[in-house]
Amino acid sequence: MLEARGITRRFARTLALDGVDFHARAGEIHALVGENGAGKSTLIKIFAGRLKPDAGRVTIAGEPLAAGSANRARAAGVAAVYQSPMLFERMTWEENLALAGFGDGTGARDPRAAAARAAALARDLGFVLPPAGATLERRSVADRVRLEIIRALGADPRVLILDEPTGLLAPAELAAFLAMLRRLRGAGRAVVIVTHKLAEAIAVADRITVLRRGRRVAECRAAATDAAELAHLMLGDLASAQRAAPVADARIEGQAVADPGTTDPRCAAPVLTVEALTLDDGARRLLDSIGFTLTAGEIAGVAGVDGNGQAELIEVLAGMRTPGAGRIVMGRADDDASSGGAARSALRSAGGLAVIAQNRDSDGLILDMTLWENILLARPVRTRFTRRGWLQRSRAAAFCGELLERFQIRTATGPAGLAGALSGGNRQRLAVARAMAGAPRVIVAHDIGRGLDLRAAEAVRQMLREFAAAGGAVMLISGDLDELLELCGRLYVLSGGRLIETAAGDRDPARLGLLMAGAAS
Amino acid sequence: MSAPRSAPARGGSAIARLAAAIRPVAALILFAVVIAIVLALVLLTLGASPVEVFADLWRGAFGDWLALTDTLVKSTPLIFTGLAVAVAFQGALWNIGAEGQLLIGALAAGAIGPALGGWPHGAAIVAMLAAGAGGGALWGAIAGGLRARREVNEVISTIMLNFVAAQVLSFAVHGPLMEASGAFPASAPIAAAATFDVYLAPSRLNFGMLLAAGLAVACYLGLFHTAAGFQLRALGRNRRASAFFGIPIARMTIGTLALAGAIAGVGGAVQVSAITHRLYETLSPGWGYEAIAVALVARLNPLAIVPAAVLFGALDNGSQAMQRAAGVSPELVYVIQALVILTLLAFDASATGALRAAILGAPAAGPDDPGAPPAALPPAAPIATRDA
């Protein structure tokens, strides 16, 4: 169906793709796997007409595809869903769909027709749509991804390309979504998924292409390979059995993972206490009496599907929102009594709490500022490199250079380069490096592994483990159960704005999935 | 690309710095050539001789000592208002109100000016400038407060405040501040102690130009070398991330618009102190609006505001000579100004990018994920194509 030969693409001095062949056959799901920076995104952008290759050609069902035209690609039946949703923020989701020509097929851009058709599609997929007439500004990333998938399917494409589509779907949605992919394949389409999750690739795909540093290193049938082999192909000699191991028991296989065996957190000194935190938006209760303690050296996990209070909890902890009631205290609850606004300013000025945003491109980084300026966004770092109001630019840049070195952030330009020039994985490393650079006592991280490949995700996890081992406390908010089970001691579930601590017997993806969906503990 | 990260970054920075220094100059030359060709075509279609018109324009702007100094004098208010626009724009605060801020600054200075008779010269000047800064800051802070506290779009509020300022000035010179004879809508002249010294008479060159240039340097340092300026630029580039990292958005909004207003207000005080010596309704020919063009041409860089303002001042000044000598209508100057802005914006998008690529080898328009450079690819990467 979609065949590419000798695709080469260069960005300035960087050879992103080097003579890559790719063949997605009709009636098959084809997984494209590779590390961050392997060229996956570049390749699918070429398929979708968003980038022009320097050499090579693409054919759809034997017809050559005009390079570098998104409209021609769409007309030829290629639809793509990207990792960062591309939607109109200030319009309702119905209008977003209608603008994409989604509707009754007559080409009329009618939001009502779009909504009706989307509802039918969402039922098929098992998706939950946002309330009628909601704009996208305050919707979660997961909502946006779901909407993009529906939008892409609306064009009834011959080739459907999905870039990391499952990262933000709830376990319950995941099964329906994968079933939907298989059904789409049955209709004679070619489905291409880009993924880091090798187990998922093996489970859902018929065929797998592995990219490494801009070259295709393998194409194989999914049935004839396993996660360890794929990891080896992706990473080269650097892959070890130990790295591949946690990937093998993914949520699809539904196995329980052993407790990582951290020290009993109850014995250690509490570094962050949150009590009865409540946040309302009009009549809606977004956070309902949230309470937890974090102790030195622990990594606690909060499982849950986005839209259940995750973003709000993060915003309260980051000081963007003032809670209606409750207390946030660094240390033990009776150490000092502060609440609401006073608490967050105390947290901030002490530099005790660092928050890593979920959406690194819009909340975490300023893409058209330099790397060292992005490091300076963290208040403790900014304070450190400010003397009587003057920025110490060269010292800050040198410090940023050290961070790039220490956390192995790959950049062609050094500290003076723009953050927007980094690949996704390196952007996340920069965000984590910055959080640690302020020497906080607590790090709260939201979806830290999103869009990261094996090596980068493992590197980020290792950073968190080392931070905890050195006496810091980490709270990891995530929908990725594998990550939570592997990394966390205590596990909570955030569902419908309520935080529940799970029992030891709940350490099982299926059981956690039920809790995330709102089943009582 | 792990090994060559630190060393070539140092070596490259010298080249990059040189390229960064050459780039604007090269772009400017290219830009001047293009604009000359476009203008020549426009003039030819109008039946005028391009050579003659350009010669008159040049003579009027820079032809002799008097023309040159007058160009600088005419540029001075544009520097102040251009800075007022650029500083706010850096924070994505769209200050269209430099006109009103300048007028209120002039009003405040013109109101106290006549009463400064017994003051020492230096103190009187400082009082004039402080009054101008205070008036402008108040005008800017109103828009800032509306934005920060009540979510009123500052584009609308600053435009509206321009009209209010013009009416307040008109009321003042027709009413409470009207000169004693009551014959003209103008205020009483300011005291001699409050007037700026003129250098190198008969030119009108004065301390205001130096003050404006100094303020441009101060704005540059403030924006790029202080923590407050960093926070402002961060706010301008990503409001959400700025909120996430605890940048005090409301305080920055009010403070920045007040500062911008103060800069424009000082410009108004300078104009009264150095040139008009009293208040008129028609004090400003629209400097606050022209300032937006000046700021955009300077790409919001305070240092570039000075030459950009001189360019616009020269066009203003030269056009009068051109009109007298070549018999070309003064409206042509507006055409020229519009062409200058449009050409520059066009250059901003394409030519500077291409030039940067040519000089630095960096991509003109970077993709969001260029991928990691495959510099250290293992030599024998096996292509294992297994197909069952």
Image (cartoon, rainbow, N blue to C red):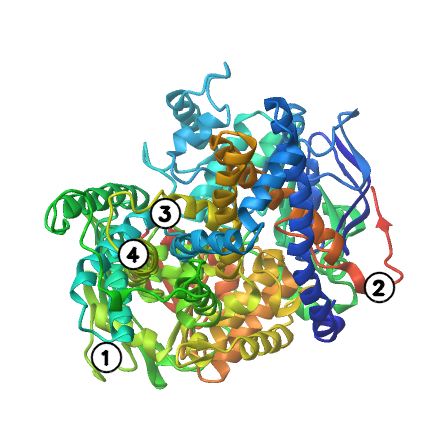
Q: CA distance from mark 1 to mark 4?
A: 62 Å
Q: Residue at x 29, y 56 (%)?
A: B272
Q: Which residue is mark 4?
A: B272
Closer to us: A119 or B328? B328
Q: Chain of mark 4?
A: B
SS state under label 2: loop
Could you tell me the amino acid type at mark 1? Ala
Of circles 1 and 4, which is in front? 4
Residue displayed at 74% across by 62% down: A235
- Residue A245 in picture, x, y percent from top left: 65, 65
Look at the image and tell me whether residue A317 can be seen: yes
Chain identity of mark 1? A
Depth check, mark 3 against mark 4: the one in front is: 4
Q: Which is more foreground, mark 2 or mark 4?
A: 4
- Residue A258 in sight from this viewpoint: no
Residue bearing the label numbered 2: B378
